[in-house]
């Protein structure tokens, strides 16, 4: 029990630090990019940020939904990425936490901030002052649209992830396979606990 609590606390602290760093990086990049483009490009950037959140949320759900057994069979046949896919499902709780909670939530926060920046640009483009009625209306519309796209996209992504979980995780495993073999980046320890299902 103590070991479980120790690992849990260690992971929680680690993921909090990672979230802090990634949130800062995402915010700096999005702010820098948006400051140098018009409102139309800004809208596209906001959409891309939303899609990133939906995509990673889908991977997180697929990791918890996928069964480990198919990847054992694939790994025995030396299919590239099968071993990495097996490790992903075995560490499903951490993968889901990182993809859905860390990247997904950061994308949600950053997309909201980016949408506000786009509203300000659009307001000035329409020759309206900061704090005007037009800005208020645009802010409400953009916030509602971003929220709808995020929630609707994640709902669709979850359905897709559950239905095609094995195929999705295999593709992610192949990406990890390339990174591990070409760039020598190790994502998982050799020893890991068995998969934990999130209910």
Image (cartoon, rainbow, N blue to C red):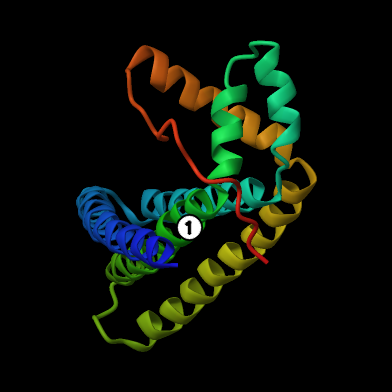
Q: Which of the 4 quarters of the picture holds residue 186?
A: top left
* Tally of marks: 1
Please give the name of the residue rendered at 37% of the width and 12% of the height, measured from the top-left corner: 182
Please give the name of the residue rendered at 64% of the width and 51% of the height, measured from the top-left corner: 64
Q: Is residue 69 above or below residue 94?
A: above
Please state the horizontal and vertical placement of residue 181, each as a whole percent of the image: 41, 14
Please give the name of the residue rendered at 76% of the width and 40% of the height, measured from the top-left corner: 164
Quadrant for the N terminus, please.
Answer: bottom left
Please state the horizontal and vertical placement of residue 132, each as a whole percent of the image: 31, 87
- Of residues 118 and 85, which is closer to you in this image? 85
Task: Write down the residue under mark 1.
Answer: 97
Please state the horizontal and vertical placement of residue 122, each as a whole percent of the image: 35, 66
Please state the horizontal and vertical placement of residue 142, each as a whole percent of the image: 47, 71
Q: Which of the 4 quarters of the picture holds residue 106?
A: bottom left
Q: Residue furthest right?
A: 163
Quadrant for the C terminus, please.
Answer: bottom right
Q: Residues within 10 Å of mark 1 (few under 14, many from 20)?
A: some
Judge left or right: residue 70 versus residue 89.
right
- Of residues 138 and 95, which is closer to you in this image? 95
Q: Element at badge 1?
A: helix
Q: Which of the 4 quarters of the picture holds residue 8?
A: bottom left
Please give the name of the residue rendered at 70% of the width and 50% of the height, measured from the top-left corner: 65
- Of residues 114 and 180, which is closer to you in this image? 180
Q: Is residue 188 above or below residue 95?
A: above
- Of residues 10 and 55, which is closer to you in this image? 10
């Amino acid at each position: 029990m103590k070991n479980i609590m120790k690992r849990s606390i260690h992971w929680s602290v680690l993921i909090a630090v990672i979230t802090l760093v990634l949130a800062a990086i995402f915010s700096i990049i999005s702010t820098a990019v948006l400051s140098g483009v018009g409102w139309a490009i800004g809208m596209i950037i906001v959409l891309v940020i939303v899609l990133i959140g939906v995509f990673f949320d889908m991977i997180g759900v697929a990791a918890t939904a996928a069964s480990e057994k198919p990847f054992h069979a694939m790994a025995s046949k030396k299919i590239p990425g099968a071993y990495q896919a097996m490790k992903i499902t075995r560490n499903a709780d951490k993968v889901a936490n990182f993809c859905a909670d860390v990247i997904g939530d950061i994308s949600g926060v950053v997309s909201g901030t980016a949408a506000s920046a786009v509203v300000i640009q659009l307001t000035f483009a329409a020759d309206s002052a900061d704090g005007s009625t037009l800005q208020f209306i645009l802010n409400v519309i953009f916030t509602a649209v971003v929220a709808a796209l995020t929630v609707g996209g994640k709902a669709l992504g979850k359905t897709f992830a559950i239905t095609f979980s094995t195929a999705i995780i295999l593709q992610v495993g192949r990406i990890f396979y390339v990174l591990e073999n070409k760039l020598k980046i190790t994502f998982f320890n050799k020893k890991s606990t068995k998969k934990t299902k999130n209910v």
